[in-house]
Image (spheres, rainbow, N blue to C red):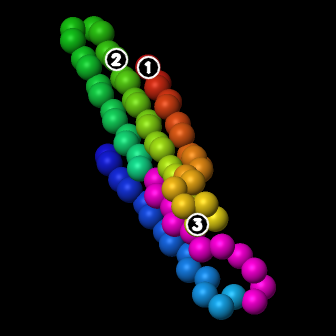
Amino acid sequence: MLGFNASQTLLSNWSAGGQSSITGTAYVNLFRNYTKNSWTWDNTLDLSYGLLNNGIIEGNNVKIDDKIENSL
């Protein structure tokens, strides 16, 4: 399974303060099942990575998600 999530916040003439921002997160979920004779092997791999740009300093991206998880 592959996926990408994105969101954007735009604040214009906002008297209470705040910053416009844009975020993006990509993820991959893989599963493999191996069976031969009496042997069975299940393996999963979950990866994700996300960035936030809040517009305060142009090009200043902040990592909001990172995951590497493997299960045998």
Q: Is residue 70 left or right of residue 61?
A: left
Q: Is residue 2 left or right of residue 65?
A: left
Could you say which quadrant of the image residue 44 lies in? top left
Q: Which residue is mark 1?
A: 72
Q: Residue at x 34, y 17 (%)?
A: 41
Mark 1 → mark 3, Cα distance in angstroms: 41 Å
- In the rendered image, residue 63 lying in the magenta stretch gets the answer no
- Give the x, y percent position of residue 14: 69, 88
Could you say which quadrant of the image residue 6 lies in? bottom left
Near mark 3 (Cα within 10 A), the count class, few <14, some 14-19 or many ≥20, is few
Q: Residue at x 38, y 24 (%)?
A: 43
Q: Earlier in the sequence, mark 1 or mark 2?
A: 2
Q: Residue at x 51, y 56 (%)?
A: 59
Q: Is residue 10 above or below residue 52?
A: below
Secondary structure, mark 1, is: loop
Mark 1 → mark 2, Cα distance in angstroms: 7 Å
Q: In the depicted view, which residue is nearer to us: 2 or 58?
A: 58
Q: Earlier in the sequence, mark 1 or mark 3?
A: 3
Residue 69 seen: yes
Near mark 2 (Cα within 10 A), the count class, few <14, some 14-19 or many ≥20, is few
